[in-house]
Amino acid sequence: MGDIILSAGATLLNDYYYYTIRFIRNGFVPAKDMLLSTPDGIFTVNAIPELDEPANYWKLLCVKTDKIITT
């Protein structure tokens, strides 16, 4: 996913990381169970809350995982 993410900011909420992510590609839609690689580790997207965000921004509720991303 690194090639499509422009910026990300995380907030820890209980045991979940709440990411606000800006995607470079117009029309990209993240999916539940998608893996997200960050400097803090690899996370699984658990929820995509329905929030009013500017274009190309998504809020993702993630949990840390032991899965490995392969390319």
Image (cartoon, grey):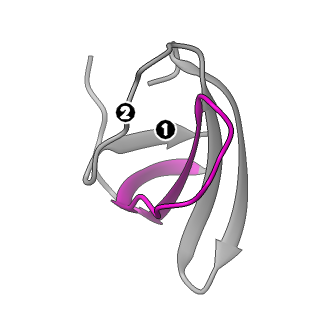
Is residue 6 inside the magenta stretch?
no
Who's the residue at 44% across and 41% down the image?
A: 36
Q: Nearer the viewer, mark 1 or mark 2?
A: 2
Is residue 46 inside the magenta stretch?
yes
Front in this rendered view, residue 21 or 41? 21
Instruction: Find residue 49 and report its horizontal and vertical position in percent.
Output: 46, 64
Question: Measured along the vertical axis of the image, is residue 67 above or below residue 36?
Answer: below
Question: Measured along the vertical axis of the image, is residue 61 above or below residue 12?
Answer: above
Question: Measured along the vertical axis of the image, is residue 47 above or below residue 56?
Answer: below
Instruction: Find residue 20 and report its horizontal and vertical position in percent.
Output: 66, 49
Look at mark 2 in the image and give the residue it sits on: 29
Q: Quadrant of residue 46?
A: bottom left
Instruction: Find residue 16 and report its horizontal and vertical position in percent.
Output: 53, 74
Q: Earlier in the sequence, mark 1 or mark 2?
A: 2
Q: Quadrant of residue 23?
A: top right
Quadrant into which the N terminus falls: top left
Q: Is residue 57 left or right of residue 25?
A: right
Front in this rendered view, residue 66 or 44? 44
Crowd tier of the residue under label 1, counting other residues whose Cα lies within 10 Å: few below 14, some 14–19, many 20 or above: some
Query: Magenta span covers which residues?
Result: 41-64
User: What type is the residue that disc 2 sits on?
Assistant: Val
Look at mark 1 in the image and give the residue it sits on: 37
Instruction: Find residue 70 and report its horizontal and vertical position in percent.
Output: 26, 25
Spatial separation of the CA atoms under disc 1 and disc 2: 16 Å
Who's the residue at 33% across and 57% down the image?
A: 66
Q: Quadrant of residue 22?
A: top right
Question: What secondary structure do most residues of the magenta stretch adopt?
Answer: strand
Front in this rendered view, residue 60 or 38? 60
Tag 2 secondary structure:
loop
